[in-house]
Image (cartoon, rainbow, N blue to C red):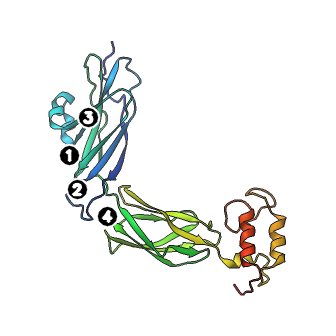
Amino acid sequence: MSRCNRKGLFVPVALALGLIFGAPQVSGATNGTLTVLWDANTTDTDLNGYRVYLSTDATLFNLTPAAARPLATTRTVGTSTTTSVFTSLNTASTYYVAVTSYDTSGNESVFSNVASAQPAVTPTLTSVSPTSATQGDTGVTVTLNGTNFQSGAVVSFGPGLTVTALNTSAVPLRLVATVDVETTAPVDMRDVSVTNPGNGVATKTNGFQVLLDVARVDINQSNRIDGGDIIEVAAAFASRSGDASYSVDFDLNVDGAVDGVDLSFLVTYFGSVGPF
């Protein structure tokens, strides 16, 4: 029978941080969550499970697991489990965590390495205003309303949109982003996300739309959307990104294919006269 008494057979490899939605003021709040993940013990053939030890006292892990067990928050899991979630944690505290394994005879290993983290605050994102911008727009001011926003948050609008500045003076309830839209940003609805410094994330599904720049429909730049533009698109029709005949100039919605959607834009704006 092997004994689980070797140090370093497995280690917590990540602390995934999150928060159950709570009040905007987080100091001292007991709504934090830590998800602990560790490497499996693949050495001991009579492995019977793992014990996860959690504490706000780092010195606890200087003790043996048997001595630390009554003083820590301890979770016992089976051999097929390599993750454990602790909830209702104080978001203002730093937590320390280590893992042991034990065999069928009750022999327990020493502690793995000790990981530490402070439970993160997960924001909520309730509204985005305005809800759209056009290809090529720059310096668009977008206000994001919600709760639990933090200074240092990162805001993302997806591909083709760049946040050039973020005003966090109204946290935790509001963020104001300055956004540039690339001229070839995909024309679509996209999710907006806010990621706090500790990786707590909120997402507004289909929260923002990129609109077509009508000037792009005037493909031959004749100041009129007409048959000449249709001929341009027809020559590249059914091509995809990477094909010799493909060009983003013909792929009006920038989805990687010149297809019926692009023709529909031509039909919609056919006969329009510029300047656009």
Q: Amino acid at mark 1?
A: Thr
- Residue carrying label 1: 56
Number of marks:
4
Decide if residue 273 is on the left or right side of residue 76: right
Q: Amino acid at mark 4?
A: Asn
Mark 3 or 2, closer to the camera: 3
- Name the element at disc 1: loop
Mark 2 or 4, closer to the camera: 4
**Residues marked 4 and 3 touching at CB (< 8 Å):** no
In the image, residue 179 lies at what x, y percent? 51, 73
Q: CA distance from mark 4 to mark 3?
A: 29 Å
- Residue carrying label 4: 148
Which of pointers 4 and 3 lies earlier in the amino acid sequence? 3
Q: CA distance from mark 3 to mark 2?
A: 22 Å
**In the figure, residue 54 lies in which quadrant?**
top left
Mark carried by residue 92: 2
Which of pointers 3 and 2 lies earlier in the amino acid sequence? 3
Q: Quadrant of the C terminus?
A: bottom right
Residue 150 visible at all:
no
Which of pointers 4 and 1 lies earlier in the amino acid sequence? 1
- Name the element at disc 3: strand
Q: CA distance from mark 2 to mark 1?
A: 11 Å
Q: CA distance from mark 1 to mark 3?
A: 15 Å
In the image, residue 127 lies at what x, y percent? 41, 70
Residue drawn where x is 35% and y is 55% of the image = 198
- Name the element at disc 4: loop
- Residue carrying label 3: 75
